[in-house]
Amino acid sequence: TTPTTGSTSPATPPWWPTGSKKGRNMQINNMKIHPGISFEEYRALPGLSYSGIKNGDFVPTKKMMLGTAVHNYILEPDKYNGTNRDIVVPIARVILSQLGELSKHMQTELSVTCNMEYAGLSMQYKGRIDMIRPGRLLIDLKISEIPLGRSIDHFGYGDQLTGYCLATRTPVGIIIRVCPKTLKTEKAMIRQNPAFWERQVTKYGIPVNIAI
């Protein structure tokens, strides 16, 4: 059953990651989805995101702003202000051609919060996912000149998508990358590894018995 706003997550499915080799499994509790909220409202939600952990407060670069414009054009067209239209539209068309009919069946810009629990500690988490069918598939869009394999290693995109998958109990996470100069596309399915998030819970978590 797909969780609704304010609902807790369904029973653990058989594909759920088993955590560390020591057997102290990651657990997800108090999972809530927040459909239809703005990015500003998402930022005000409690919890640590992957970007927040890695980057803290940062000033977006021109390349990041191009990615945001493409995201808005595809995922939130009412927010696209026409910036760099000669670049944005061709990139968006390539992405939409890759998605095909799938784009009609995905929720977009979906925000989620949950408690990640591990080794007796609990950490509030939040994430904002580009495209998702909760419990089935999620897709993250990247606009970058850097080849996808290098990006995954350098920026930790596998850890980012693992967080999304863990929080939404979604088994499959896929990245679609488009080069803005050549319009070349790459796709990669992310193999979930909860080790990064286990470390974050160990670092930032509080005892489960006093967590909200």
Image: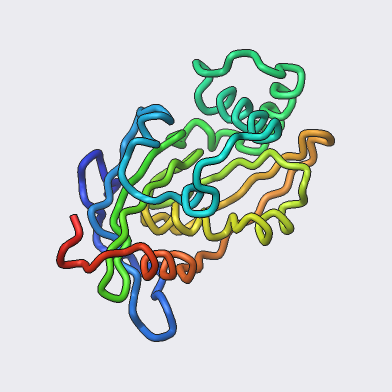
Q: Residue furthest bottom?
A: 22
Residue drawn at point x = 25 percent, y = 54 percent: 9
Residue drawn at point x = 54 percent, y = 49 percent: 55
Q: Nearer the viewer, residue 138 or 206?
A: 206
Position of the C terminus by quadrant: bottom left
Where 76 sits versus 194, above or below?
above
* Rendered location of residue 17, percent (x, y): 41, 70
- Count of labels shown? 0
Q: In the visual, does 190 lie left or right of 114?
A: right
Q: Residue furthest left?
A: 209
* Rendered location of residue 44, percent (x, y): 34, 36
Residue drawn at point x = 40 percent, y = 75 percent: 19
Q: In the visual, does 197 lie left or right of 151?
A: left
Q: Nearer the viewer, residue 211 or 183?
A: 211
Q: How is the image coloured?
A: rainbow
Q: In the visual, does 84 lie left or right of 77?
A: right
Where 99 sits versus 36, above or below?
below
Examine the image and state in which quarter residue 181 appears.
top right
* Rendered location of residue 88, percent (x, y): 70, 24
Where 174 sits versus 97, above or below?
below
Q: Residue furthest right?
A: 182
Examine the image and state in which quarter residue 27 appears.
bottom left
* Rendered location of residue 169, percent (x, y): 37, 56
Examine the image and state in which quarter residue 11 appears.
bottom left
Residue drawn at point x = 72 percent, y = 58 percent: 149
